[in-house]
Image (tube, helix red, strand yellow):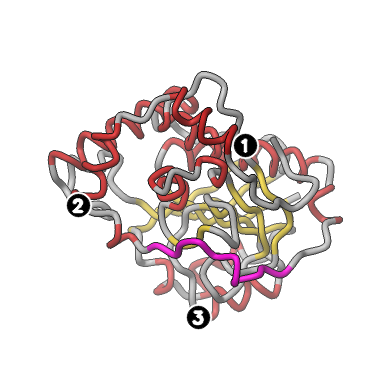
Amino acid sequence: MKITLFTSNQPRHLALVNKLSSVAEKIYAILECNTVFPGKVQDFFKKSDIMKCYFENVMDAENSLYGDISFSKNNVSTLSIKSGDLNLLNKEQLQEALSSDLYVVFGASYIKGWLIDHLVAHKAINIHMGLSPYYRGSSCNFWALYDHKPEYVGSTIHLLSKGLDSGPMLYHAVPKLNNSSPFEFTMKSVEAAQQSLVERISTKEIFNYIPQQQDKTQEIRYTRNADFTDSVAEEFLNRKLNNADIATLINTAIKPRLLLPFYY
């Protein structure tokens, strides 16, 4: 099997590259590159003391699960581009990666033009870090915690569509809390998404799901990157949310309706 993956260059994205390489003969990985020092360097997220503090927590949680940035396996061909350049590429530049058996999108920028047409036609799978249709857009699992709704932390595996995070859903994946900090808890949602998808690709179970349309009337929040400001991050950090707080909220909450068989 050949798999083409559109993703980014943080440790969690590189981890998915290597996970997929274990179940595929060949991986074509198109990496949209941002700084690996968010908060310290002005990039997708702004540079500030608050952002630096926030993302130090994110990176600690990420490194605890995935280690540091690393090289890819031998059966992986990579094409590294600056984030935002993806929609400027032409078919000839991506030609080698356009005849795969499966297409996966995880953490890529908003895809448009001829490329989204190609991916939709080939039933590309998107990993949305958030439980759709409840949380859509950017940093969804942060916003679920911010809203005191940890029961909505998770991911949605769905078919890619021209609308953002709006494609027909295949299943949901949710993390186990255990003794996690808030940052570890949301990062575990990434691992649940990745591990479940790789397992279900390996068994070919992923190809047997009947896609379910999203009910947009169930939406709680739709967020953009611009909504994640210094004041929002500072407020969240000052709450000093801990494992016991999250457990209490989850145990007393009315759980969202998830697609079966969801991964836990």
Which residue occupies the foreground of this view, 242 or 118? 242
Which residue occupies the foreground of this view, 171 or 178? 178
Quarter of the image for residue 219 reads bottom right
Quarter of the image for residue 56 reads top left
Q: Is residue 243 above or below residue 120?
A: above
Q: Earlier in the sequence, mark 3 or mark 1?
A: 3
Residue at 33% over, 60% down: 225
Q: Label 3 to label 1, Cα distance in Å?
A: 31 Å
Q: Is residue 98 above or below residue 196?
A: below
Q: Is residue 113 left or right of residue 44?
A: right
Quick one: which residue is furthest to the front in this view? Answer: 252
Quarter of the image for residue 184 reads top left
Residue that numbered label 2 is attached to: 46
Callout 1, which amino acid? Ala
Residue 4 lies in the magenta stretch: no
Q: Is residue 248 above or below residue 78?
A: above
Residue at 45% over, 68% down: 110
Q: Which residues are magenta?
A: 213-223
SS state under label 1: helix
